[in-house]
Amino acid sequence: DTEVTQTPKHLVMGMTNKKSLKCEQHMGHRAMYWYKQKAKKPPELMFVYSYEKLSINESVPSRFSPECPNSSLLNLHLHALQPEDSALYLCASSEGGQAIPYNEQFFGPGTRLTVL
Amino acid sequence: QKEVEQNSGPLSVPEGAIASLNCTYSDRGSQSFFWYRQYSGKSPELIMFIYSNGDKEDGRFTAQLNKASQYVSLLIRDSQPSDSATYLCAVNNSSGYSTLTFGKGTMLLVSP
């Protein structure tokens, strides 16, 4: 089973709202990722968690706050977003996260976020 | 800066033909290479990965890797209209954590 699930599928929020995106995998993967993808662009890495610890933050604004409650779950907390943050937010997971080159990443279906 | 280059397309092929998608990369230390298919509005789906020089076949798909030339390709035989999508080439980064650098993707259009 190579399934990564994400909720919600769609989210519309105002600039003053607080919301959270959720991601779950049951493949025993120890690395989880958040990506942002704008239309006609490739996925852009935001955060990497390896063994439940934040390993990489790609200089993401603090209005995005990741959390990894356990090895199967990954959250992305959103607060005071801007309209330009509207995008497809993708979660991915892979077996391991630390310098393991043979490491396929599997993506969830994504959350389509619209910020009004 | 590590780069992955792909022709943005669109690459148009008739149904039943072979589609050839190409990708070059700059990081000589990269060891693993991935092809993702992405339908419009959907998430990327991993369809092939290759680690060793040469060819790797899986059904109608063949991935080819030439590390000396820093070149990876994807061949799709007997192309079907359902293959119409954007194909993303991704290359693992050789330093630090196992992250990927994506190309901008090639749009493939298969006409009936």
Image (cartoon, coloured by chain):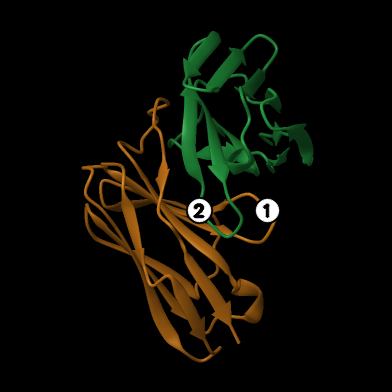
The residue carrying pointer 2 sits among few (fewer than 14), some (14 to 19) or many (20 or more) residues within 10 Å by Cα, namely many
The quadrant of the picture occupied by the N terminus of chain A is: top left
Query: B65 left or right of A22?
Result: right
Task: Work out whether residue A4 can be spotted.
Answer: yes
As shown in the figure, which amino acid type bears the numbered disc 2?
A: Ser
Nearer mark to the viewer, of 2 and 1:
2
Distance between the Cα atoms at labels 2 and 1? 12 Å
Residue type marked 1 = Lys
Rendered residue at 64%/22% (across/down): B73
Question: Which element carries disc 1, helix, strand or loop?
Answer: loop
- At label 1, counting other C-alpha atoms closer than 10 Å, the crowd grade (few under 14, some 14-19, many 20 or more) is few
Which of the pair A74/B65 is nearer the observer?
Answer: B65
Q: Which chain is green?
A: B
Task: Indicate the secondary structure of the residue bearing disc 2.
Answer: loop
Badge number at residue B43: 2
Colour assignment, chain A: orange
Task: Indicate the position of residue B72 as horizontal and vertical percent values.
Answer: 63, 21
Residue B49's x, y, as percent? 48, 26
Q: Disc 2 sits on a residue from what chain?
A: B
Query: In the rendered view, would you say B74 is above or below A55?
Result: above
Is residue A8 shown left or right of residue A80?
left
Label 1 marks which chain's residue? A
- Tell me, yes or no, if residue B7 can be seen here: no
Picture residue at 50% right of the left edge, 72% below the top: A62
- Picture quadrant of residue A67: bottom left
Read off the residue under disc 1.
Answer: A41
Residue at image point 70% right, 55% down: A40
